Image: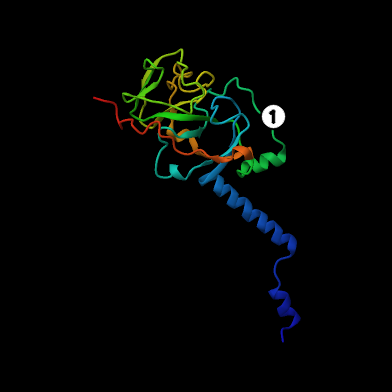
Amino acid sequence: MATSKEHRQRRGLPIWQESLLLVAIATVMAIVVKSFFLQAFYIPSESMQPTLLVNDKLLVQKVSLWTGEPERGDIVVFDDPGGWLAGQVEPSDPNFVQKGLETIGLFPTGNHLIKRVIGVGGDHVQCCDGSGRLIVNGQPIDEPYVLDPTVIRNREFDVVVKDGYLWVMGDNRDNSADSVAHLGDPGGGQVQVDDVVGIAWVRVWPLNRLGGLGDVDAFDDVPDSPPS
């Protein structure tokens, strides 16, 4: 028969200690998930309409960046390359609970940019052909996701994307501070691959628009490199 001393030795931690331990484990796991797998963001502007609307909440995945880079057509979230967010209206400061949840990836984060990848390293990107379509490596692109496909950007451009960089544009071409808008900046409007936080994966809010943000086929016929 077990003695009272043996019984006390077999007892678990007090409930308050178990609770703290569980919270600590959950927090560490959440930070790991945010750092390496998934992170929540919200959409602060109209630049990606109609694909993404203001205040949409989405998850970006980071797994595909472990061994590869973003591809043409991907929607990417990235850190400010330098002054791109200047002058934009900042969201209201979150309370301390929201800040804590944001730190561990459970509250949607702002202060990043989200655009669609049009060109990757080595690509020749031009605007535009006679129908207002972008040209990538000599191939005109039909983009059904663009808000107004008939809009021709007022500023023509002809660029070759540097290795390790991306050319990005919003789906709302007339209202997007993207690579074209920053063409005259020191970086020439190109975004370093290293600045990419993740690739948009699924919209989680609002529920009536819940769904994936998967691949598009607009770039399927684009050659891997510009014509010689």
Comparing 117 with 221, the one in front is: 221
The extreme bottom residue here reads 1
Across the whole image, how many numbered discs are drawn on residues? Answer: 1
Q: Nearer the viewer, residue 29 or 7?
A: 29
Q: Position of residue 182 (x, y in %)?
A: 47, 19
Q: Is residue 204 visible?
A: yes
**Is 85 in front, or is 199?**
199
Residue 117, horizontal then vertical, whole percent: 44, 30
Q: Residue at x 36, y 34 (%)?
A: 220
Secondary structure of the residue carrying tag 1 is loop
Amino acid carrying label 1: it is Ser
Which residue is outermost to the top?
154
Mark 1 neighbour class, 10 Å CA radius: few under 14, some 14 to 19, many 20 or more: few
Q: Quadrant of the N terminus?
A: bottom right
| Residue 176 image position (x, y, % from top left) | 52, 21
Examine the rendered structure and indicate whether residue 188 appears above or below residue 59: above
Residue tagged 1: 92
